[in-house]
Image (cartoon, helix red, strand yellow):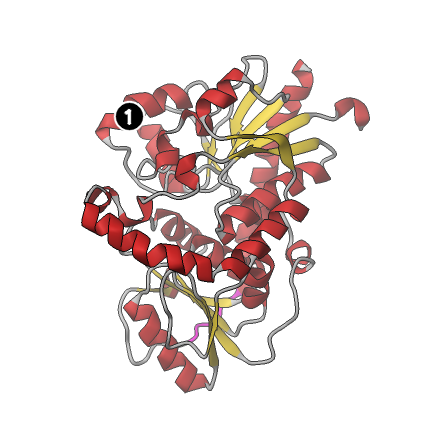
Amino acid sequence: MEENKLKIKTLTCHDIYNFGASLQAYALITHLKKLGHDVEIIDYKPDFLTFDLWAIGDKWKKNPFVKFAYFAYVVPKRLLMHGRRKKFDSFTKKQLILTNKKYINFDELKENPPQADIFFAGSDQIWNPLLPNGKDPSFFLDFTKKSAIRASYAASFSVTEIPDNLVDQMLAMLNRLDFISVREESGNQLLQQHGVQGEVVVDPVFLLPAADWAKLTVKKPKDDYIFVYDQENNKILKETALHLAKKYNLKIYAIEALYPLRYADKRINDAGPKEFLTLIQNCTVCLTNSFHCISFSLIFNKNFLFFKRTHMKVNSRMDDLLAYLDLQSHAVSAFKEHVDIINIDYEKVDKKIDVKRKSSFQFIDRVLEHAQKNV
């Protein structure tokens, strides 16, 4: 195997104190390592991934009063979540294999690029044009030498249209990639609209079996509980959680970040990636508006309900996943008194996921085989 060993670098949003970002970064390098290759994540952390106002949207972040209110709320909140950040830092240090050099902007990458036979950009929302990373040429691997293979793995636009003022720039960068794969069918349709060839693959977290993820979990909670992971303080999600908790005599466990989820019986503000996995693996039902929370519910064969995002409407990835799995009935758009925990036929669901997983393995294998011919 040694003569076929490739040097591979991945580039993604790996260190932003976000569960999905950390876990998808871990999954891709772990799968590539299992194939026998030398793999590292490029330690790229530009300013906009450390502390930016993208969360409140372009419309508001130029307003000085809104900016002041945002910082006045967020800064103390983040200080209170020191325990959470510490666990993320530990996960990054122990589980993610990073390059020795840290880069903070595209110019640094361009001037002193990391060396590899293959570069993989992705996964997650690296091409979301509503976010700064969707405009950053780094996430299109524009810094690499022409001799290297440039590929995307499960990159996500998270929107169904590219803003007119960004189309030319994004197309130029996309067309310089050797292999393109995206995470959602809507993303592939977007590529096709602009004459770019790509294919749909699964998010990296699906590349690893549930048993691999279970190895990362920690002590199981004692209660029977509903797990709430709500990224925007959704009123319908809250009403549904309270209704189901009363109906089934369940506790409500919630990971608390920016929003105070006071209705929960247990509010957890120091969860790291391992605790996130544990809370999903052991819950009775998961209520969320997070793509990766849904993904791990599927991996661990848990019941879940999905609540569409309303602040930043980045629902295409969740909609596509549920449509492919025929699980649209698990999307809740309004609170109803008769809402229930709907059991999922995981025998059917697992078979459909496995089809996509195998084609995703094949995509990665094609990229690796192409690189091996050119080494």
Q: In terms of depth relative to the viewer, which is nearer, 248 or 199?
A: 248
Q: Residue furthest toward the right?
A: 2
Q: Position of residue 17 (x, y in %)?
A: 49, 50
Q: In terms of depth relative to the viewer, which is nearer, 227 or 66?
A: 66
Count of all numbered marks drawn on residues in the image = 1
> Magenta segment, principal secondary structure?
loop
Q: Position of residue 331 (x, y in %)?
A: 35, 63
Q: Position of residue 35 (x, y in %)?
A: 71, 36
Residue at horizontal 43 percent and vertical 51 percent from the top: 321
Quadrant of image for the N terminus: top right
Crowding at mark 1 (Cα within 10 Å: few <14, some 14-19, many 20+): few
Which amino acid lies under the numbered mark 1 shown in the image of this protein?
A: Val
Residue at horizontal 52 percent and vertical 66 percent from the top: 345
Q: Position of residue 94 (x, y in %)?
A: 67, 48
Residue at horizontal 25 percent and vertical 32 percent from the top: 163
Residue 96 sits inside the magenta stretch: no
Residue 178 visible to the viewer: no
Q: Is residue 66 left or right of residue 17?
A: left
Mark 1, secondary structure of its residue: helix
Is residue 38 depicted above or below 264 in this figure? above
Q: In terms of depth relative to the viewer, which is nearer, 84 or 255?
A: 84
Residue 206 visible to the viewer: yes
Residue at horizontal 45 percent and vertical 20 percent from the top: 107
Provide the residue span drawn in magenta.
Answer: 341-345
Q: Give the residue at mark 1.
A: 167
Quadrant of image for the C terminus: top right
